[in-house]
Amino acid sequence: MLDVSGIRSMHLKHFGDDPRVFLAPGRVNLIGEHTDYSGGFVMPAAINFGTLAAVSRRRDGRTEIWSENVGERAAFAPEEMPGKRDGRWWDYPLGVAWALREAGVEIPPYSLTLQGDVPLGAGLSSSASIEVATAVALLSLSGAEMPREQVAKLCQRAENVYVGASCGIMDQFIACNGKEDHALLLDCRSFEFRLAPIPRDAGLVIANTMVKHSIAGGEYGIRRREVEEGTAILQRHRPGIRMLRDATPEDLENWGAEMPDPVLRRCRHVITENLRTVAAADALEAGNLRKLGDLMAAAHVSYRDDFEASCEEADVMVEAAQRLRGLIGARLTGGGFGGCTVNLVEQRHAEEFADGLAEQYRARTGIQPEIYRCHASAGAHAVEEPG
Ligand code: ADP
Ligand code: MG
């Protein structure tokens, strides 16, 4: 649970100053997986789990950061500021400060308190939420204005270059630009986006498999290389294909035979996923939830069979959902190999759906899952103290 007055008093206790407080959300991706880094389409929603960042200026030149989640303080005198990653949690906020400074923002010495309720490492992007919360907090301290799109890009740069984790733009973009009760269709090349309303009678039920297979990090890189390899083959025939997002199913029919087997299937996933994602936004805008659910189901099959980024536990969770009353659509969300499934559910059945899903998953895997009933929420913003 996020606790705004709690983080204020915590900040005061640790640092002796009254802070300004900001919130950036985690996200759930409804559809469009592994499409962002090849310039394609994604459709996430920000969720009502996020990270609070409380910030105040320091007069002693030091930088101090407290994470309530870790229960640890990172403290640096000016001459001790790490110039590169330590492989620790503070890489995320320090990476953001680094990226902002590289972009010319002057950040004064600061105290920062962080507290999040996005489960860490579960595929709901606690990383983007800590980055964007830190970015808006530090920007406010420095008095600099920056368009949201640039904030997202700098946070992505912090994660790619400073933290050293490869990721596309989706997570940071939605943490910046989410809107209450809306999903966001993003063109990851042009950064154009469109908000599509999620009807009030449809609920988001996120189911944490509680597993993250250790291959996830390595496989992410392998998938990116496979996608690049396939793109290069198509480009030889049709130079108009600048990124895989430009390729069509016909291109794959014409030249897919030149690709080694896994590469062909990886590209087929990405190409069809882009089509599904745009169709999903159209369906949501038209209020056609049945169509959206079918697209989510097809996306899971493609992610599982062509992209081979699912895992047994996630497949069990998706299959279990399909047998429960109220389901509109279910699929594994996020980078793959574990993490969470996203379920779009008729609101009036959401409670029994959540209970039934937990029960079935536990019966079939022996693992007690965590189920989060969420709603689409706003992007990063300042928070006022209640009352
Ligand atoms: P995900 O983004 O799916 O949650 P990542 O591995 O990308 O998973 O990011 C998780 C990491 O982000 C954590 O291991 C931790 O280092 C960092 N992090 C996120 N939130 C916090 C927080 N409130 N305090 C400290 N570190 C955090
Ligand atoms: Mg992450």
Image (cartoon, grey):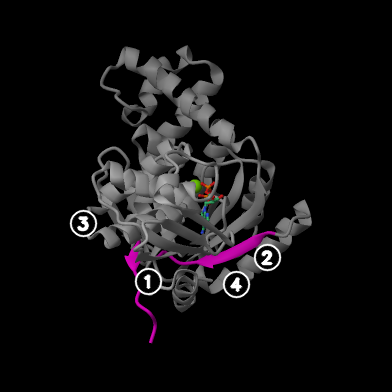
The quadrant of the rendering that contains the C terminus is: bottom left
From this view, report whether residue 280 is shown above or below residue 166: below
| Residue 291 appears in the figure | no
Helix, strand or loop under label 2: helix
Can you give x and y, in whole percent of width and height, for residue 70 in the image?
A: 58, 59
Please, what is the three-letter code of the amino acid marked with disc 3? Glu
Q: Which mark is residue 321?
A: none
- Magenta span: helix, strand or loop, mainly? loop
Disc 4 target residue:
351
Disc 1 target residue:
19
Please state the extent of the stretch shown in magenta in the rendering: 369-387
Q: Earlier in the sequence, mark 3 or mark 1?
A: 1
Please, what is the three-letter code of the amino acid marked with disc 4? Glu
Q: Is residue 319 left or right of residue 10?
A: right
Helix, strand or loop under label 4: helix
| Residue 215 appears in the figure | yes
Q: Is residue 22 left or right of residue 327?
A: left
Q: Is residue 375 left or right of residue 209?
A: left
